[in-house]
Structures are given as C-alpha cells and as structure tokens.
Image (cartoon, rainbow, N blue to C red):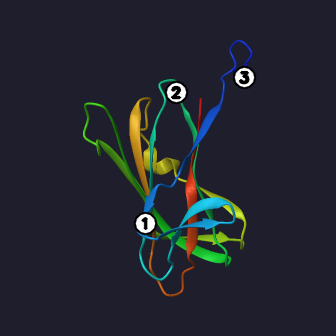
Amino acid sequence: MPMRSSPGEKATREFFIPATQSDGTLTNLGDYPAHLLSGTVSQSARMAAFIPWDFKTLLSITIMYVDTVGGTVNISIATDYGAVGEAYNANSGTIGGGLGILTAANFIAEYEISTAVANLAANDYLGVAVTTRGNVLDNSVYIIGLRIRYE
C-alpha cells in the first residue's frame, strides 16, 4: 500500500537492518536473531545499510538491543559511510568509549546514534559497529539491529 500524505506534508519513512556480523555469539533471544556481546570481553556487532535516494533529513537512527540482566550496559559506537566513488570511510563518527546506558532486564531498548552520522546523505553506504567495553562489572548485551527513520 503506498504512503499517503497531504500536499506540503513530509512523509516519514523508516527501515530496519538486522545485525549481520559480530565477534560475539550469533544466537537468538526468544524469536529474535541476535548477536550476544560479552560484557567482560570487548566484542563488536556490525550492520550495514544503504541510504535510499529519497533521504532528505535524518529523524533518528537507533541501535535496538536487549539486556537480560538489567543495570548498566557499556558500549561505544563507530561508523563509516560514503557513496559510490568515495572512500568507504569518506565520513566516520564515534560515540563514547564505554558509554554507560541504564537498562531494564528483558526490555527492548533503543540507543540513538545520530551524532555518529552527522554527514549522512542519500545514496551513502553505511557501516555501524557497536562495541562492548569489556569490563568485569559490565552486562552482556544482545544486539538486534539498526532502525533508521527519515524524511
């Protein structure tokens, strides 16, 4: 069914990309395929996306994750992105270096990473890595994927 909007109204679009590779364990959380990253060893989950031709403005870009223990999840974010004819890392960004996020056990959570993609544009290829700090006090986390909302 096509999207409908009033004249002059911007149509919001969104899509979801599952995490496709990790240093952790490919597993499942209930019926969700997930990458389990250890809290005690530094591990990364990665995902890649193509930004559609009709992209004008980024509304949000979030990592979907679940912590089955609850408490603090310490992660950092790294991104590389560019278009055909550019270097794969023509643009890049980072967030944190052990950023602590308070979570509730077994609840779906999202973490906003738009500051790591400040120059994202239509027709860019995007790579995102989510990395745990690897501290004995940190929780393990299930990385599910990446949600992008735009106009």
Which label's residue is closer to the chain start, 1 or 3?
Answer: 3
Which residue appears at 43% of the width and 80% of the height?
41
Which residue appears at 68% of the width and 76% of the height?
70
Looking at the picture, how far across and down is residue 79, in whole percent? Answer: 40, 51
Residue at the spot of label 2: 56
Which label's residue is closer to the chain start, 2 or 3?
Answer: 3
- Separation (CA) of disc 1 from disc 2: 30 Å
Q: Residue 137 carries which label?
A: none
Residue at the spot of label 3: 1
Residue mark closest to the camera, 2 vs 3: 3
Q: In this view, does 101 lie above or below 81?
A: below
- Separation (CA) of disc 1 from disc 3: 37 Å
Q: Quadrant of residue 111?
A: bottom right
Looking at the picture, how far across and down is residue 91, in whole percent? Answer: 33, 43
Looking at the picture, how far across and down is residue 146, in whole percent? Answer: 55, 50
Task: Tell me the quarter of the image containing the C terminus.
Answer: top right
Which element is circle 2 on? loop
Q: How crowded is mark 3: few (under 14 residues within 10 Å), some or many (20 or more)?
A: few
Residue type of the residue flagged with mark 1: Ser
Residue type of the residue flagged with mark 2: Lys
